[in-house]
Amino acid sequence: MSRVGNLRAWRAILMICVLSCAPAGVEAAESNSPAAVAGADEPFGLSTAAITSGPLLEKWLRVEREVASEQQVLKICEHDPASCPSQPAREFLAIVDSARSLEGRAQLGEINRAINLKIKSMSDMALYGVEDVWSSPLATFAAGAGDCEDYAIAKFVALQDAGVAADDLRIVILRRDIREEDHAVVAARLNGNWVMLDNLHMIMVEDQNVRGYHPIFLLDQNGVKLYLDAPSIPRGSRGSERAVGQILH
């Protein structure tokens, strides 16, 4: 399981803002049921707030720009595979093509399985010598390795390219309950329920059956949201103040 670097500090700042008065860079989103229910508009059925500025949003927007650039390469390779200049693009398209002939849970499972097997789990520190590098799909395929958010980003893009509607896809960042570790998965809406695609498991479970984690962030085509109903960081705690200091200084 990999740590998503600095997310604990970002969440501390955002939760302090939300728990005080008018939040800077955070806007209240439409509230869902406070309990995890099947068919909710968002995975886990919890209230969220849109993040309108800050490092997490900037990181996600950078990934989206890189994905948009890679889509041009993928279009060229799909139109004329024989002249495709990118081996990672050919490998990515092979996974997408195999999933296009499938539907429903079988399609989700094919993408989850194929990308789990294609990418070797490795930390950003081991790969790049720094923490918290988010890679676009072709960059991850070129490296042949990545951590949890790299798997999630690759699946998120592959599922859309295979025909899954963007409105039915999310990347969810979870916090492990018994450790201070963060983990990224893809959530795909299937028949009104949210199914989790995890690089740690081939078996896909619905959000209400996830155990040992709680959600903290949600990423999709519309940006980034903070889960408000997940366990919060108490205001005035030393941990919160230290986290704020790490980001602001």
Image: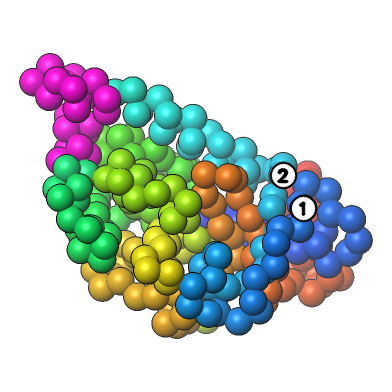
In the visual, does 20 lie left or right of 87? right
- The amino acid at mark 2 is Thr
In the visual, does 214 lie left or right of 142? right
Q: Is residue 182 visible?
A: no
SS at circle 2: loop
- The amino acid at mark 1 is Glu
Question: Looking at the image, is 114 positioned above or below residue 222?
Answer: below
Quarter assignment of residue 162: top left
* Image position, residue 148 (x, y; %): 39, 56
Quarter assignment of residue 95: top left
Mark 2: few/some/many CA within 10 Å (<14, 14-19, 20+): some
Q: Nearer the viewer, residue 150 or 23?
A: 23
Q: Identify the mark at residue 52; answer none if there is no mark.
A: 2
Taking the magenta stretch, the answer to whether it contains residue 80 is yes
The residue to which callout 1 is attached is: 27
Taking the magenta stretch, the answer to whether it contains residue 21 is no
Q: Quadrant where the N terminus lies?
A: bottom left
Which of pointers 1 and 2 lies earlier in the amino acid sequence?
A: 1
How far apart, in angstroms, are the residues tagged by discs 1 and 2? 7 Å
Question: Looking at the image, is 3 positioned above or below residue 131?
Answer: below
